[in-house]
């Protein structure tokens, strides 16, 4: 009778140990699965974040390039305007100087004609 109790106790102990082992193994598998899933999500998030970062970086570079091109175009337009203004000012100056020179020569010729006429008379 005592042997049967020891045998049953041993069976119960082995069964309990086996149950604990199964629970531990299943628990470890569940933990591993959770860790793998979290790792996959983290890697996916990192990949998405990296892609977004690259897209944002490329977008920033494109915006900077466009801004530089626009700035160069604006600068070129300003230079063209300045050149046009200089040309207009120089042209007006030349016209004015020419008119003054022509008038001065005309007055000088008139004076010479008057002086020669006075001398001849």
Image: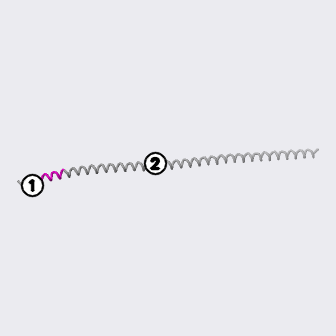
What number is the disc on residue 102? none
Mark 1 near mark 2, Cβ–Cβ under 8 Å?
no
The magenta span reads 103-113
Whether the magenta-drawn stretch holds residue 56 is answered as no
Where residue 8 sits in the image (x, y, percent)? 89, 44
Q: Residue at x 15, y 51 (%)?
A: 107
Quick check: 21 left or right of 79?
Answer: right
Q: Residue at x 61, y 46 (%)?
A: 48
Q: Farthest residue toward the left?
A: 121
Say whether disc 1 or disc 2 marks the residue closer to the N-terminus: 2
Q: Nearer the viewer, residue 18 or 64?
A: 64
Q: Nearer the viewer, residue 40 or 87?
A: 87
Split into 4 quadrants, where in the image is the N terminus?
Answer: top right
> What residue sits right under mark 1 in the picture?
116
To which quarter of the image does residue 12 belong? top right
**Distance in Å between CA atoms under marks 1 and 2:** 72 Å
> What residue sits right under mark 2 in the picture?
67
Where residue 91 sits in the image (x, y, percent)? 28, 50
């Amino acid at each position: 009778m005592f042997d049967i109790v020891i045998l049953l106790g041993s069976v119960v102990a082995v069964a309990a140990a086996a149950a604990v082992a199964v629970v531990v193994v299943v628990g470890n598998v569940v933990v591993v699965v959770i860790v793998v899933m979290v790792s996959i999500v983290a890697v996916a998030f990192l990949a998405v974040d990296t892609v977004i970062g690259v897209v944002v970086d490329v977008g920033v570079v494109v915006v900077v390039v466009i801004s530089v091109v626009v700035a160069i175009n604006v600068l070129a337009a300003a230079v063209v305007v300045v050149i046009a203004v200089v040309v207009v000012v120089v042209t007006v100056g030349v016209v004015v100087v020419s008119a003054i020179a022509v008038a001065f020569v005309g007055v000088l010729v008139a004076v010479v004609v008057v002086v020669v006429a006075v001398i001849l008379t």
